[in-house]
Image (cartoon, helix red, strand yellow):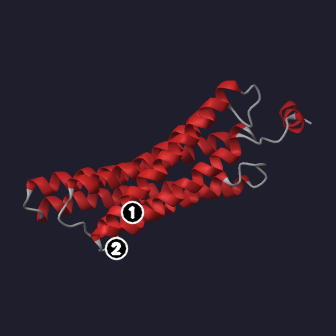
Amino acid sequence: MSFSSIFKFLTPKDKTFIPLFEENAKLMVEGAVLFNKLFLVTDLAEKSSLMIRIKEVEQKGDEVTHRIFEELNKSFITPFDREDIHELASSMDDVLDFINSSSQRIRYYKPKHLGEEFVELSELVLQASREIHKAISELRDLKHTFKIKDACVRINEIENNADDIFYHSISKMYENETDPIEIIKKKEILLSMEEATDKAEDVADVLKSIIVKNA
Protein backbone atom coordinates (compact mmCIF):
# COMPACT_ATOMS: atom_id res chain seq x y z
CA MET A 1 0.00 0.00 0.00
CA SER A 2 1.42 3.39 -0.99
CA PHE A 3 1.96 6.23 1.46
CA SER A 4 -0.84 8.26 -0.16
CA SER A 5 -3.22 5.30 0.18
CA ILE A 6 -2.31 4.89 3.86
CA PHE A 7 -2.79 8.63 4.41
CA LYS A 8 -6.24 8.53 2.79
CA PHE A 9 -7.19 5.53 4.94
CA LEU A 10 -6.13 7.27 8.14
CA THR A 11 -7.64 10.64 7.23
CA PRO A 12 -11.18 11.07 8.59
CA LYS A 13 -14.00 11.65 6.12
CA ASP A 14 -14.41 15.31 5.31
CA LYS A 15 -17.52 16.84 6.89
CA THR A 16 -16.78 20.47 6.09
CA PHE A 17 -15.46 21.28 2.64
CA ILE A 18 -17.36 18.80 0.45
CA PRO A 19 -20.78 19.77 1.87
CA LEU A 20 -19.92 23.44 1.26
CA PHE A 21 -18.86 22.72 -2.32
CA GLU A 22 -22.08 20.75 -2.83
CA GLU A 23 -24.08 23.67 -1.45
CA ASN A 24 -22.32 26.08 -3.82
CA ALA A 25 -22.88 23.76 -6.79
CA LYS A 26 -26.57 23.58 -5.95
CA LEU A 27 -26.76 27.37 -5.79
CA MET A 28 -24.96 27.61 -9.14
CA VAL A 29 -27.57 25.40 -10.80
CA GLU A 30 -30.35 27.36 -9.14
CA GLY A 31 -28.94 30.61 -10.47
CA ALA A 32 -28.44 29.14 -13.95
CA VAL A 33 -32.03 27.83 -14.05
CA LEU A 34 -33.36 31.27 -13.14
CA PHE A 35 -31.06 32.90 -15.68
CA ASN A 36 -32.21 30.58 -18.48
CA LYS A 37 -35.83 31.27 -17.55
CA LEU A 38 -35.11 34.98 -17.86
CA PHE A 39 -34.92 34.57 -21.65
CA LEU A 40 -38.04 32.40 -21.86
CA VAL A 41 -40.59 34.67 -20.14
CA THR A 42 -42.08 37.80 -21.65
CA ASP A 43 -43.76 39.44 -18.66
CA LEU A 44 -41.60 42.36 -17.51
CA ALA A 45 -42.59 41.99 -13.85
CA GLU A 46 -41.60 38.32 -13.93
CA LYS A 47 -38.28 39.19 -15.59
CA SER A 48 -37.58 41.75 -12.87
CA SER A 49 -38.41 39.20 -10.17
CA LEU A 50 -36.04 36.67 -11.74
CA MET A 51 -33.20 39.20 -11.81
CA ILE A 52 -33.71 39.95 -8.13
CA ARG A 53 -33.74 36.23 -7.28
CA ILE A 54 -30.55 35.64 -9.28
CA LYS A 55 -28.84 38.38 -7.28
CA GLU A 56 -30.02 36.78 -4.03
CA VAL A 57 -28.66 33.38 -5.10
CA GLU A 58 -25.33 34.96 -6.03
CA GLN A 59 -25.10 36.57 -2.59
CA LYS A 60 -25.76 33.20 -0.94
CA GLY A 61 -22.98 31.75 -3.07
CA ASP A 62 -20.63 34.48 -1.89
CA GLU A 63 -21.45 33.56 1.71
CA VAL A 64 -20.69 29.87 1.11
CA THR A 65 -17.41 30.74 -0.63
CA HIS A 66 -16.44 32.94 2.32
CA ARG A 67 -17.14 30.03 4.69
CA ILE A 68 -14.90 27.77 2.59
CA PHE A 69 -12.04 30.27 2.85
CA GLU A 70 -12.59 30.62 6.59
CA GLU A 71 -12.47 26.85 7.06
CA LEU A 72 -9.36 26.62 4.90
CA ASN A 73 -7.57 29.16 7.07
CA LYS A 74 -8.21 27.22 10.28
CA SER A 75 -8.06 23.59 9.07
CA PHE A 76 -4.94 21.48 9.44
CA ILE A 77 -6.22 18.47 7.49
CA THR A 78 -8.07 19.00 4.21
CA PRO A 79 -9.68 16.42 1.86
CA PHE A 80 -7.34 17.45 -0.96
CA ASP A 81 -4.65 20.00 -1.80
CA ARG A 82 -5.23 23.37 -0.13
CA GLU A 83 -4.44 25.26 -3.32
CA ASP A 84 -7.01 23.19 -5.22
CA ILE A 85 -9.63 23.91 -2.57
CA HIS A 86 -8.95 27.62 -2.94
CA GLU A 87 -9.00 27.48 -6.74
CA LEU A 88 -12.15 25.36 -6.85
CA ALA A 89 -14.01 27.70 -4.51
CA SER A 90 -12.87 30.78 -6.45
CA SER A 91 -13.73 29.40 -9.89
CA MET A 92 -17.16 28.15 -8.79
CA ASP A 93 -17.85 31.56 -7.27
CA ASP A 94 -16.80 33.17 -10.56
CA VAL A 95 -19.37 31.16 -12.54
CA LEU A 96 -22.21 32.40 -10.35
CA ASP A 97 -20.78 35.92 -10.36
CA PHE A 98 -20.89 36.06 -14.16
CA ILE A 99 -24.40 34.61 -14.25
CA ASN A 100 -25.47 37.46 -11.99
CA SER A 101 -23.38 39.99 -13.91
CA SER A 102 -25.10 38.99 -17.15
CA SER A 103 -28.50 39.31 -15.50
CA GLN A 104 -27.70 42.72 -14.05
CA ARG A 105 -26.42 44.00 -17.39
CA ILE A 106 -29.76 43.07 -18.93
CA ARG A 107 -31.53 44.74 -16.03
CA TYR A 108 -29.72 48.06 -16.29
CA TYR A 109 -28.78 48.24 -19.98
CA LYS A 110 -32.36 47.47 -21.07
CA PRO A 111 -31.58 46.21 -24.60
CA LYS A 112 -34.49 46.46 -27.02
CA HIS A 113 -34.38 42.83 -28.11
CA LEU A 114 -32.35 39.74 -27.26
CA GLY A 115 -32.35 37.08 -29.97
CA GLU A 116 -32.12 33.31 -29.98
CA GLU A 117 -28.35 33.38 -29.48
CA PHE A 118 -28.91 34.66 -25.94
CA VAL A 119 -31.26 31.77 -25.22
CA GLU A 120 -28.68 29.32 -26.59
CA LEU A 121 -25.89 30.76 -24.47
CA SER A 122 -28.05 30.71 -21.34
CA GLU A 123 -28.81 27.03 -22.00
CA LEU A 124 -25.07 26.30 -22.29
CA VAL A 125 -24.43 28.08 -18.98
CA LEU A 126 -27.13 25.91 -17.41
CA GLN A 127 -25.67 22.72 -18.91
CA ALA A 128 -22.20 23.59 -17.65
CA SER A 129 -23.57 24.30 -14.16
CA ARG A 130 -25.32 20.93 -14.06
CA GLU A 131 -22.14 19.14 -15.13
CA ILE A 132 -20.24 20.90 -12.34
CA HIS A 133 -22.91 19.80 -9.88
CA LYS A 134 -22.54 16.18 -11.07
CA ALA A 135 -18.76 16.30 -10.71
CA ILE A 136 -18.83 17.90 -7.26
CA SER A 137 -21.18 15.18 -6.01
CA GLU A 138 -18.45 12.62 -6.83
CA LEU A 139 -15.78 14.31 -4.70
CA ARG A 140 -16.88 12.67 -1.45
CA ASP A 141 -14.94 9.45 -1.95
CA LEU A 142 -13.45 9.76 -5.46
CA LYS A 143 -14.52 6.19 -6.27
CA HIS A 144 -15.99 7.15 -9.63
CA THR A 145 -13.41 9.51 -11.03
CA PHE A 146 -14.52 8.59 -14.55
CA LYS A 147 -17.78 10.43 -13.84
CA ILE A 148 -15.82 13.56 -12.93
CA LYS A 149 -13.67 13.17 -16.05
CA ASP A 150 -16.77 12.76 -18.24
CA ALA A 151 -18.31 15.89 -16.73
CA CYS A 152 -15.09 17.83 -17.36
CA VAL A 153 -15.04 16.72 -21.00
CA ARG A 154 -18.63 17.89 -21.44
CA ILE A 155 -17.83 21.22 -19.80
CA ASN A 156 -14.96 21.73 -22.24
CA GLU A 157 -17.29 20.94 -25.15
CA ILE A 158 -19.88 23.37 -23.79
CA GLU A 159 -17.27 26.12 -23.53
CA ASN A 160 -16.21 25.53 -27.14
CA ASN A 161 -19.84 25.73 -28.28
CA ALA A 162 -20.27 28.95 -26.30
CA ASP A 163 -17.23 30.44 -28.06
CA ASP A 164 -18.72 29.58 -31.45
CA ILE A 165 -22.08 31.12 -30.58
CA PHE A 166 -20.41 34.22 -29.16
CA TYR A 167 -18.28 34.98 -32.21
CA HIS A 168 -21.06 34.13 -34.65
CA SER A 169 -23.45 36.40 -32.75
CA ILE A 170 -21.00 39.29 -32.71
CA SER A 171 -20.41 38.90 -36.46
CA LYS A 172 -24.13 38.80 -37.20
CA MET A 173 -24.79 41.78 -34.93
CA TYR A 174 -22.17 43.92 -36.68
CA GLU A 175 -23.81 43.10 -40.00
CA ASN A 176 -27.44 43.65 -39.03
CA GLU A 177 -27.60 46.05 -36.07
CA THR A 178 -27.71 49.71 -37.05
CA ASP A 179 -27.83 51.22 -33.57
CA PRO A 180 -24.27 51.46 -32.16
CA ILE A 181 -25.59 51.78 -28.58
CA GLU A 182 -27.48 48.52 -28.95
CA ILE A 183 -24.34 46.87 -30.27
CA ILE A 184 -22.43 47.92 -27.17
CA LYS A 185 -25.21 46.74 -24.83
CA LYS A 186 -25.63 43.35 -26.47
CA LYS A 187 -21.91 42.74 -26.82
CA GLU A 188 -21.36 43.41 -23.12
CA ILE A 189 -24.13 40.98 -22.18
CA LEU A 190 -22.88 38.30 -24.56
CA LEU A 191 -19.33 38.72 -23.27
CA SER A 192 -20.43 38.23 -19.68
CA MET A 193 -22.42 35.11 -20.60
CA GLU A 194 -19.52 33.62 -22.52
CA GLU A 195 -17.24 34.40 -19.58
CA ALA A 196 -19.49 32.28 -17.35
CA THR A 197 -18.69 29.24 -19.51
CA ASP A 198 -14.98 30.14 -19.44
CA LYS A 199 -15.12 30.07 -15.64
CA ALA A 200 -16.93 26.73 -15.78
CA GLU A 201 -13.98 25.40 -17.76
CA ASP A 202 -11.69 26.72 -15.00
CA VAL A 203 -13.71 24.62 -12.55
CA ALA A 204 -13.18 21.58 -14.78
CA ASP A 205 -9.43 22.23 -14.85
CA VAL A 206 -9.27 22.25 -11.04
CA LEU A 207 -11.34 19.07 -10.82
CA LYS A 208 -8.95 17.34 -13.21
CA SER A 209 -6.03 18.47 -11.04
CA ILE A 210 -7.72 16.99 -7.96
CA ILE A 211 -8.23 13.67 -9.72
CA VAL A 212 -4.57 13.47 -10.79
CA LYS A 213 -3.24 14.33 -7.35
CA ASN A 214 -5.54 11.87 -5.57
CA ALA A 215 -5.22 8.98 -8.02
Residue at image x 68%, y 55%?
137
Q: Name the residue furthest right.
A: 1
Q: How many marks?
A: 2
Is residue 132 at least partly visible in the picture?
no
Q: Nearer the viewer, residue 142 or 97?
A: 97
Task: Using the numbered discs, state the Cα–Cα distance from disc 1 to disc 2 in whole angstroms.
Answer: 10 Å
Report x, y in % for residue 18: 70, 45
Residue 36 vs 94, above or below: the answer is below
- Left or right: residue 87 versus residue 35 is right
Is residue 61 at least partly visible in the picture?
yes
Residue, disc 1: 50
Q: Nearer the viewer, residue 177 or 89?
A: 89
Q: Tell me the SS state at disc 1.
A: helix
Report x, y in % for residue 46: 35, 69
Upstream in sequence: badge 1 or badge 2? 2
- Left or right: residue 14 versus residue 125 is right
- Left or right: residue 140 versus residue 117 is right
Nearest-to-viewer mark from 1 and 2: 1
Residue, disc 2: 41
Report x, y in % for residue 143: 79, 52
Q: Residues within 10 Å of mark 2 (few under 14, many from 20)?
A: few
- Asked whether the residues under the numbered discs 1 and 2 touch, taking CB atoms below 8 Å apart as contact, a structural biologist would say yes
Residue 115 vs 19, above or below: the answer is below
Report x, y in % for residue 152: 58, 53
Q: Identity of the amino acid at label 1?
A: Leu
Q: Identity of the amino acid at label 2?
A: Val
Q: Where does the N terminus fall, quadrant-wise?
A: top right
- Left or right: residue 199 versus residue 117 is right
Q: Nearer the viewer, residue 155 or 93?
A: 93
Q: Nearer the viewer, residue 85 or 173?
A: 85
Q: Where does the C terminus fall, quadrant-wise?
A: top right
Q: Residues within 10 Å of mark 1 (few under 14, many from 20)?
A: many
